[in-house]
Amino acid sequence: MIYYIQPGDTLLRIAIQFNTTIERIIEANKILDPNLIFVGQPLFIPIFDISRERYSIEIDTEKRILKLLSNGTFKKQYPVAVGKPSTPTPLGNWTITKKALWGEQFGGYFMQLSVPHGTYGIHGTDKPWSIGQAVSGGCIRMYSSDAKKLYNTITIGTPVRIY
């Protein structure tokens, strides 16, 4: 599909709008400098192909590890912080329902989970010392640089299993 850049667009906004990643747009359009896009510029938006990578996430709350899987195969592991005993991280099978850029407190990157009883997500933090601890209000905290990488890799609808 071809999309023409509109005023105020960024590659991040376009990627979120079309449920893809910045990396896929850059690759498909051979963009050398993502900061040099302009209004009216045509972009090829890669439509999700089921033969391509399908990411999923597993979070082990005891080991405080987030695992990124691609087509069911382990790809990468990140240390995380989880909910404290009084506000535990919700266990279960969820999906990423929203991706947003939040403030510094959340390390800039927030990936909301489909938990029906509250707002929970995976996000960065301004408290890097908390990683590896059970100290959050239920969310999964990551180092902000790791949260940015994950945010730019996964799409809305990514399955998340928390155990």
Image (cartoon, rainbow, N blue to C red):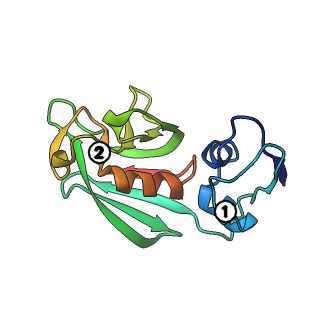
Q: x, y percentage for residue 149?
A: 44, 58
Crowding at dot 1, Cα within 10 Å, few <14 / some 14-19 / many 20+, comes out as some
Q: Residue shown at 78%/38% (left/top)?
A: 6
Q: Disc 1 marks which residue?
A: 26
As shown in the figure, which amino acid type bears the numbered disc 2? Arg
Above or below for 87 versus 42: above
Q: Residue shown at 39%/39% (left/top)?
A: 121
Crowding at dot 2, Cα within 10 Å, few <14 / some 14-19 / many 20+, comes out as many
Q: Disc 2 marks which residue?
A: 141
146 or 39, which lies in front? 39
In the image, taking residue 1 as reference, residue 94 lies left or right, namely left
Q: Residue shown at 15%/30% (left/top)?
A: 86
In the image, taking residue 63 as reference, residue 42 lies left or right, namely right
Q: Nearer the viewer, mark 1 or mark 2?
A: 1
60 or 1, which lies in front? 1
As shown in the figure, which amino acid type bears the numbered disc 1? Ile
Give the label on residue 143, or none: none
Q: x, y percentage for residue 32?
A: 66, 66
Q: x, y percentage for residue 120?
A: 38, 34
Q: Secondary structure at mark 1?
A: helix
Above or below for 33 versus 126: below
